[in-house]
Image (cartoon, helix red, strand yellow):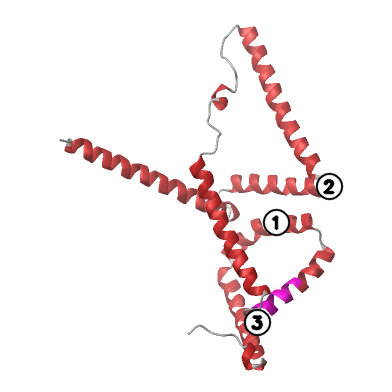
Amino acid sequence: MADPTNQSSQISSSHGLNDGHSAASKDSKFSVIDLVHWRDPKKSGVVFGVSLLLLLSLAAFSVISVVSYLLLALLCVTISFRIYKSVIQAVQKSNEGHPFKALMEKDVTVPPETFRKHVDVCLTHVNRVLKQMSRLFLVEDLVDSLKLAVVMWLLTYVGAVFNGITILILADILLFSVPPIYEKNKTQIDRYIDIARTQVNTTIAKLQEKLPGSLKRCKAE
């Protein structure tokens, strides 16, 4: 017969593990939000600086050159540190072993369960995008398809002015600058957004009224 004390301890430990996993997942879920809202200025500054530097490097050099230089710099650091520690150990006649032994003993493999979980999540998003594209390009809803056509037409002008790397640089700057600005001026910005949304909805409603009956948006009953 099982000991009630052991059962209670097992239950409490399992609850603790579950709480730990949920807390960890919650932290990972909100880490990006914390970064773009500058909850920790040091971390946000490092991520923003590194990402902007990488994009600027890609704008000036090819992808192969940037990746090669990054890996070469990392290799120079590790080799230099390895030689330095070897010299120190030889001078001090110590036997500390390999300086990266702790890192080398860490498991860096991806568990199959984790890989399958992320693949399933990606597959869900891909299927959702494919379904939405099919709905738009096969004109299930004329108004939504016209919206996409207008957006694509505007993007042709954007593409004529900016290349892909420039757009990514602007997106990176906006990603780290817009959230804190919105947080400080949330009330005023929300008011203007509501006004713009009302104008857009009114315009769309007027366009729908002018469409033939067979082309009007079919609302769910």
Callout 3: few (<14), some (14-19), or many (20+) C-alpha neighbours within 10 Å?
A: some
- Name which residue lies at 55% across and 72% down: 187
Determine whether, in the image, residue 153 is placed left or right of residue 117. right
Q: Report how many numbered discs are placed on residues in the image.
A: 3
Q: For the residue carrying disc 1, how many other residues have a C-alpha within 10 Å: few (<14), some (14-19), or many (20+)?
A: some
Counting residues from the start of the chain, the first of labels 3 and 2 encountered is: 2
Which residue occupies 56% across, 33% down? 108
State if disc 2 and disc 3 touch (CB < 8 Å): no
Q: Is residue 68 magenta?
A: no
Give the camera-side residue of 101 and 112: 112
Which amino acid, mark 1?
Answer: Ile
Mark-to-mark CA distance, 3 and 1: 33 Å
In the rendered view, tell whether residue 73 sits above or below residue 203: above
The N terminus sits in image quarter: top left
Q: Is residue 130 visible?
A: yes
- The answer to whether residue 33 is visible is no
Label number found at residue 143: 3
Q: Which mark is residue 173?
A: 1
Name the disc covering residue 60, or none. Answer: 2
Q: Describe the element under mark 2 as helix, strand or loop.
A: helix
- From the image, give the main secondary structure of the stretch colored magenta: helix
Going 53% across and 31% down the picture, which residue do you hit?
Answer: 107
Q: Earlier in the sequence, mark 2 or mark 1?
A: 2
Quarter of the view holding residue 175: bottom right
Local secondary structure at mark 3:
helix
The image position of residue 220, as x and y in percent, is: 50, 83
Q: Which residues are magenta?
A: 143-152
Q: Residue 170, image x and y in percent?
A: 73, 58
Distance, label 3 to label 2, CA atoms, is 41 Å
**Residue at image coords 57%, 9%:** 94
